[in-house]
Amino acid sequence: MSSSGSSAFSEVNLKVAQAGEILGLKPGVISSLSSCEREVVISIPLRRGDDVEVLTGYRVQHSSARGPRKGGIRFHQDVDLDEVRALASLMTWKTALIDVPFGGAKGGVAVDPAKLSPIEKEEVIRRWTRSLVHVLGHHRDIPAPDMGTDAQSMAWLMDEFHRLEGFQPACVTGKPVQLFGAPGREEATGRGVARIAAETLKQNDVKVKGATVAIQGFGNVGRFAALVCQELGMKVIAVSDVSGGIHDKKGIDIESIFHVKTLAEVESDNRIGASEVLEIECDVLIPAALGGVINEKNVSQINATFIVEGANQPITHTADRELRTQGVIIVPDILANSGGVMGSYFEWTQNIQEFSWPVDKFRRELDTRMEKAFGNVNKVSRKFSVDLRTAAFIVSVERVAGAFELRGSLV
Ligand code: NAD
């Protein structure tokens, strides 16, 4: 459930239906695009001391109309089937929007990753893989990291998959560079978010150099977004993670704090709360932690001109409408954070060809393709006189519906 009380999956489907109606799709096609092809729920018994705790795990495959399903695995205590459905569906729209040959999927385990020892985490990943191996594979469904999982988790997943199915490094992306990972993949989501932030400023005649940025989340996405925003000349004035945050109007030196485990380790006279960062006055706000963090409770406190969605679904449907009325320009998740799956696509193709790109080529390709997707969404937004989120859904729904119809609805 989103914090507005409506389901996260139904919020995505509202956008799908809206885009489908604008495109004149048949109601049956819209319903098909609003359902998931396959949903698997598993139990994961985990040895804890001399007892066993049973965790619940998920893999939801939303669509394979445009290619093998693709999507991350989230470890978080609030993971449930509705959230995984919503995230799986967002992957379908994201991969279509950036025009890579994938469908959409998502997985998760309802567990607080901070309460798992490394050995327990490895056991959960291996068990998740064993239980789901029949629906996974480099031409079926390819997992990747998400909140609470990382490159090491993907290495365990690949190893378990190899034991069961033989050598197939393209079965998972986001792996360590020493183990078939692509140099550049780890930073790709945050890099894409920062590049899109810069493009948004330029498009709206705001100078990139010196533009102020506030970021919620200092994990994979938030950290690299902060670093690349700084490299591009923006001034990051606030960052926060689950432990709280820091605010400095003069700008924070991101390089100096990049490697901290949590922001609690950073000495600062200007500490703020974890959610306070959302209310800081700034040009660009980047929510890069949880879903539903901008909602009816705090929407009137938002003080940003632009919001670039690093996280998936950080703004509820109602808050989105309210912000647009206030004139805030929102770059939607399926565009803003698509650098991750773009990078995964590069890793997957390189694994299949058993070939590796240098990181410069990876970055160049990523930047060029992200800018192309951004330009296309802007063009459609002007053509239909709609906001960027609606425009992004128009582009992707048209592509997925086209593939669905051409394949004879048999996917
Ligand atoms: P992560 O686990 O690496 O980091 C999450 C960060 O959020 C951490 O810094 C954590 O402390 C912080 N956080 C958690 N609860 C918080 C709270 N209540 N207030 C403030 N901060 C809080 O996760 P990630 O991979 O960076 O993913 C972040 C978001 O981006 C998720 O919504 C994810 O779905 C989305 N995303 C990730 C990728 C990717 O490639 N990793 C790709 C696309 C989208």
Image: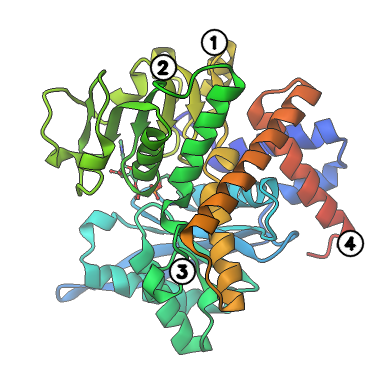
Question: Disc 2 vs disc 4: which is toward the camera?
Answer: 2
Tell me the amino acid under the disc marked 2: Ile
Examine the rendered structure and indicate whether residue 225 appears above or below residue 305.
below
Cα distance between the residues tagged 4 and 1? 43 Å
Tell me the amino acid under the disc marked 4: Gly
Question: Disc 2 vs disc 3: which is toward the camera?
Answer: 2
Residue wearing tag 2: 302
SS under mark 3: strand
Residue wearing tag 4: 408
Tell me the amino acid under the disc marked 1: Gln
Cα distance between the residues tagged 1 and 3? 44 Å
Looking at the rendering, which quadrant does residue 108 occupy?
A: bottom left
Question: How busy is the neighbourhood of tag 3: few (under 14 within 10 Å), some, or many (20 plus)?
Answer: some
Residue wearing tag 3: 42
Cα distance between the residues tagged 1 and 2? 10 Å
| Depth order, front residue of 167/354 | 354
> Decide: marks 1, 2 in contact (CB < 8 A)?
yes
> Decide: marks 4, 1 in contact (CB < 8 A)?
no
> Decide: marks 2, 4 in contact (CB < 8 A)?
no
Please name the residue shown 20% across and 49% down the image. 261
Question: Disc 1 vs disc 3: which is toward the camera?
Answer: 1
Please name the residue shown 68% across and 45% down the image. 97
Please name the residue shown 52% across and 17% down the image. 206
x, y percent for residue 360 = 49, 56
